[in-house]
């Protein structure tokens, strides 16, 4: 059963977007650097991949958060937003999505295939550790992901574009 964009929009309209907004800031920063990459600019690739990896992770965590608000009388004195999964693995986060919110995952997968011609589930599996491995590149294969920067960039871009398109008229 396919769910409409309107139903998804209604489902997520009242969700706290703080995590999503924070993740988008990482993507926006990575995007600015990515757009200015010149030939032989491999020095910037791992910082970009780190930003893209955390951005993808925050995107996947944004729709499953616990919000704790503390009040004194009718005034809020503090608010904390905590993602419910404390993992960095994009594949595991996507599996949780596909079970917890299949309609949203199906929408994202369909949008991704339309945007890129690629399979979202496979790419999230292939790049499941990009944040950790690019952040700690000195512990991992230094050549890993160098040839995949375009795929990873467009993966994250598609996620954010898909949600943004829900709210466009």
Image: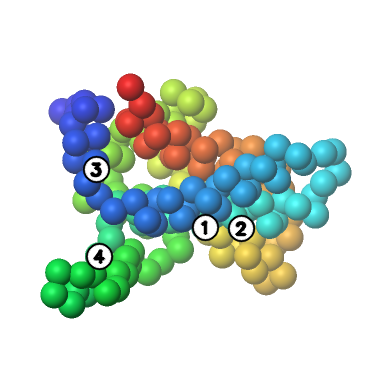
- Give the labeled residue for mark 2: 50
| Residue neighbourhood size for the residue with mark 2, other residues' Cα within 10 Å, grouped as few (<14), some (14–19), many (≥20) | many
**In front: 46, or 70?**
70
* SS assignment at label 2: helix
Tell whether label 2 touches label 4 (CB within 8 Å): no
Q: Looking at the picture, does residue 44 appear above or below residue 158?
A: below
The numbered mark, 3 or 4, whose residue comes first in the sequence reads: 3
Compared across the picture, whether 20 is left or right of 81 comes to right
Is the residue marked by circle 3 packed among few (<14), some (14-19), or many (20+) residues within 10 Å?
Answer: some
Whether residue 119 appears in this view of the structure is no
Nearer the N terminus, badge 1 or badge 4? Answer: 1
Which residue is nearer to you in this view: 36 or 92? 36
Lower sequence index among marks 1 and 3: 3
Mark closer to the chain start, 4 or 2: 2
- Quadrant of the image occupied by residue 162: top left
In this rendering, would 167 be left or right of 68?
A: right
The residue located at (40%, 42%) in the rendering is 121
* Contact flag, marks 1 and 3 (Cβ < 8 Å): no
- Describe residue 155's horizontal placement relative to residue 76 as left or right: right
Disc 1 to disc 3, C-alpha distance: 22 Å
Residue assigned mark 1:
54
When asked about the image quadrant of residue 11, the answer is top left
For the residues bearing labels 1 and 4, Cβ distance under 8 angstroms: no
Residue 92 rendering spot, x and y as whole percentages: 37, 57
| Residue where numbered disc 4 is placed | 66
Q: Residue at x 45, y 34 (%)?
A: 161
Q: CA distance from mark 3 to mark 4?
A: 15 Å
Q: Can you identify the residue that label 3 sits on?
A: 12
Q: Secondary structure at mark 4?
A: strand
């Amino acid at each position: 059963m396919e769910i409409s964009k309107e139903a998804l929009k209604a489902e997520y309209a009242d969700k706290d977007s703080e995590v999503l907004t924070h993740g988008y800031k990482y993507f926006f920063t990575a995007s600015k650097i990515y757009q200015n990459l010149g030939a032989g600019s491999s020095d910037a690739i791992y910082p970009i991949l780190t930003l893209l990896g955390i951005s993808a992770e925050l995107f996947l965590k944004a729709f499953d958060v616990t919000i704790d608000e503390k009040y004194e009388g009718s005034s809020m004195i503090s608010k904390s937003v905590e993602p419910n999964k404390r993992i960095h693995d994009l594949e595991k986060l996507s599996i949780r999505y596909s079970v917890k919110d299949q309609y949203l995952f199906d929408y994202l997968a369909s949008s991704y295939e339309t945007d890129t011609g690629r399979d979202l589930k496979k790419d999230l599996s292939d790049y499941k550790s990009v944040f950790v491995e690019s952040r700690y590149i000195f512990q991992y294969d230094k050549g890993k992901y160098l040839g995949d920067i375009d795929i990873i960039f467009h993966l994250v871009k598609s996620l954010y574009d898909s949600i943004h398109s829900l709210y466009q008229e």
